[in-house]
């Protein structure tokens, strides 16, 4: 495996691992605030990010590279509000999209079209992730401070997690 490609993919492995822990921390926070539906949604999202990482690890190893399982910094433990959680989620996903685009750029520079093709799944996935984050934020902003609206939102998040609104896509 080309060393530049390997380094770029290992960097992406770190980002996916970090994402999984980030969403796990958000899930824990939501659960302690009585937002069990949001917690289930975030736990599911954490699993999805871990799946993304594992998919990259297998790809690197199968292509003759050496995948590095990274250590990661501790994610935040506290958040100001549920809206802030989803603002941070969207900001994070935009950063992940930028990182994936950088991997794709390296693939094109190095003329590694097999890895470029593999990364297209991640490009598509990130479009979905960003759209989901924006949609959720729009709903939270519509709800504002309405407790009844927040209750229904949290229930909808649980339904989305159960229905596979977030989950491991092949």
Image (cartoon, grey):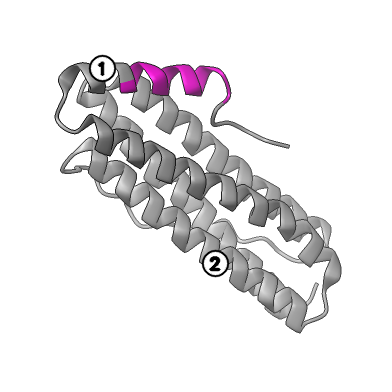
Q: Is residue 64 among what the camera can see?
A: no
- Give the answer, above or below, for where 35 lies relative to 127: above
Residue, far front:
142
Give x and y (percent) for residue 128. 57, 45
Question: In which quadrant of the rendered view does residue 148 lie?
Answer: top left
Image-based side of 35 in relation to 136, left or right: left
The structure residue drawn at horizontal position 56% and vertical position 42%, both measured from the top left corner, is 50
Give x and y (percent) for residue 69. 57, 56
Question: In which quadrant of the rendered view does residue 119 lie?
Answer: bottom right
The structure residue drawn at horizontal position 39% and vertical position 37%, both measured from the top left corner, is 136
For label 1, count other residues whose C-alpha is less than 10 Å away and answer few (under 14), some (14-19) or many (20+). some
User: Does the magenta run of residues contain 57?
Assistant: no
Mark number displayed over residue 99: 2
Report, in whole angstroms, how far the alpha carbon at label 1 lies from the one at label 2: 35 Å
Q: Is residue 73 among what the camera can see?
A: yes
The structure residue drawn at horizontal position 24% and vertical position 23%, both measured from the top left corner, is 150
For label 2, count other residues whose C-alpha is less than 10 Å away and answer few (under 14), some (14-19) or many (20+). some
Pointers 1 and 2 in contact (C-beta within 8 Å): no
- Give the answer, above or below, for where 107 lies relative to 34: below
Residue, far bottom:
109
Q: Label 1: which residue?
A: 151
Q: Give the range drawn in magenta.
A: 153-164
The structure residue drawn at horizontal position 24% and vertical position 21%, both measured from the top left corner, is 149
Mark number displayed over residue 61: none
Give x and y (percent) for residue 91. 37, 56
Label 2: which secondary element: helix
- Give the answer, above or below, for where 41 lies relative to 77: above
User: Does the magenta run of residues contain 155?
Assistant: yes
Q: How many marks?
A: 2
Question: In which quadrant of the rendered view does residue 112 lie?
Answer: bottom right
């Amino acid at each position: 495996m080309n060393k530049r490609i390997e380094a770029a993919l290992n960097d992406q492995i770190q980002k996916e691992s970090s994402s999984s822990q980030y969403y796990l921390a958000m899930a824990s926070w939501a659960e302690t605030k009585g937002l069990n539906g949001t917690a289930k949604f975030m736990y599911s999202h954490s699993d999805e990010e871990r799946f993304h990482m594992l998919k990259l690890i297998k790809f690197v190893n199968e292509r003759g590279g050496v995948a590095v399982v990274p250590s990661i910094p501790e994610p935040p433990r506290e958040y100001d509000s549920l809206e802030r959680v989803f603002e941070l989620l969207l900001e994070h996903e935009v950063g992940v999209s930028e990182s994936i685009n950088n991997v794709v750029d390296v693939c094109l520079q190095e003329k590694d079209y097999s890895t470029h093709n593999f990364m297209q799944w991640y490009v598509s996935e990130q479009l979905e992730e960003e759209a989901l984050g924006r949609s959720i934020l729009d709903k939270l902003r519509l709800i504002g401070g309405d407790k009844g609206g927040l209750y229904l939102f949290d229930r909808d998040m649980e339904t989305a997690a159960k229905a596979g609104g977030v989950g491991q896509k092949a």
